[in-house]
Image: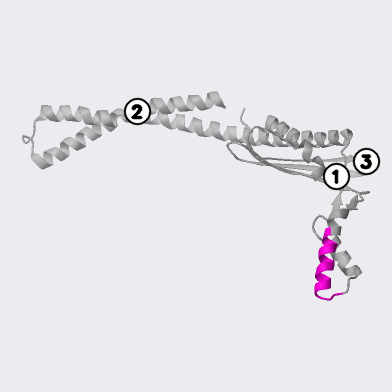
Amino acid sequence: MIYSMTGYGKATRQYESKTMTLEIRSLNSKQIDIGLRMPQAYKDREIELRNEIVRRLQRGKVDVIITVDDASASASVSVNSQVVKKYLEQIRSIAGEYHFPFSEVLLAAALRMPEALKAEAPVVAEEEWKVVLDCLDEALRQVEAFRLQEGQAMEKDFQMRIELIEKYLDEIRPFEEQRIIRIKERLQRTLTEVMGNEGYDKNRFEQELIYYLEKLDITEEKVRLKNHCEYFYKTM
């Protein structure tokens, strides 16, 4: 059975107030190459997703995108007090040096500085993770079905082309003997035109001709081509 490496799958699930969507796109690649984009909350389970994708798809350049829309989401953010204090100390120092009055504007500026605020990592319940895995399973099944369908179309095309090659291989057989005769006659005619009937050793000519014609024999190539066709049938 032939499977294409091109495929697409998408699954959507609901968990409490969250709407989860998982998309998979697969393109041709000799090895498995996975690009995975997902919420930070799921990052610690990334290897589990990758292992399942490798097990199911095996090859291809695979892009996976997981998005979560939470209707009741409220960011849990806290002030990193130690960091903000250091920013404020430096701001006060600079303000005093240049005689700027310290105001709430400078405090707001300190709160906008890097790492001044920290978001608490949400805890992912096991039930929620099972929903993510269910999305992955459905999307993978869609990709597998897509790959199979396209693979079947490719197999039919391969079958048609191999049969055409075998047909041509059979058709050239009757011409082989006549081809050798024509080549021999052409060489002999050319040699006679150049040297005349008595100008060359005909026995030596026959010996050289046999050697030359052996080089033109395509029996080995035909056998090899036939074996290649049979190998395609076995591997499909």
Q: Is residue 147 above or below residue 19?
A: above
Q: Which residue is drawn at 88% across and 54% down?
A: 81
Q: In this view, does 160 lie above or below 101?
A: above
Report the amino acid beneath label 2. Answer: Pro
Q: Main SS of the magenta segment?
A: helix
Secondary structure beneath dot 1 equals loop
Disc 1 marks which residue? Answer: 121
Q: Which residue is drawn at 88% across and 69% down?
A: 105
Was residue 92 drawn as part of the magenta stretch in this picture?
Answer: yes
The residue lying toward the viewer, choosing from 46 and 203, is 46
Report the amino acid beneath label 3. Answer: Glu
Disc 2 marks which residue? Answer: 174
The residue lying toward the viewer, choosing from 166 and 137, is 137
As measured in the structure, the alpha-carbon distance from the residue carrying label 3 to the one carrying label 1 is 19 Å
Label 3 environment density (alpha carbons within 10 Å; few <14, some 14–19, many ≥20): few
As measured in the structure, the alpha-carbon distance from the residue carrying label 2 to the one carrying label 1 is 78 Å
Q: Residue 109: where, in percent of width, then height?
A: 84, 65
The residue lying toward the viewer, choosing from 142 and 35, is 35
Secondary structure beneath dot 2 equals helix
Q: The magenta stretch spans which residues?
A: 86-100
Was residue 39 drawn as part of the magenta stretch in this picture?
Answer: no
Disc 3 marks which residue? Answer: 16
Q: Nearer the viewer, mark 3 or mark 1?
A: 1
Corner quadrant of residue 130: top right
- What is the total number of numbered labels drawn onto the structure image? 3
Report the amino acid beneath label 1. Answer: Ala
Q: Is residue 133 left or right of residue 34?
A: right
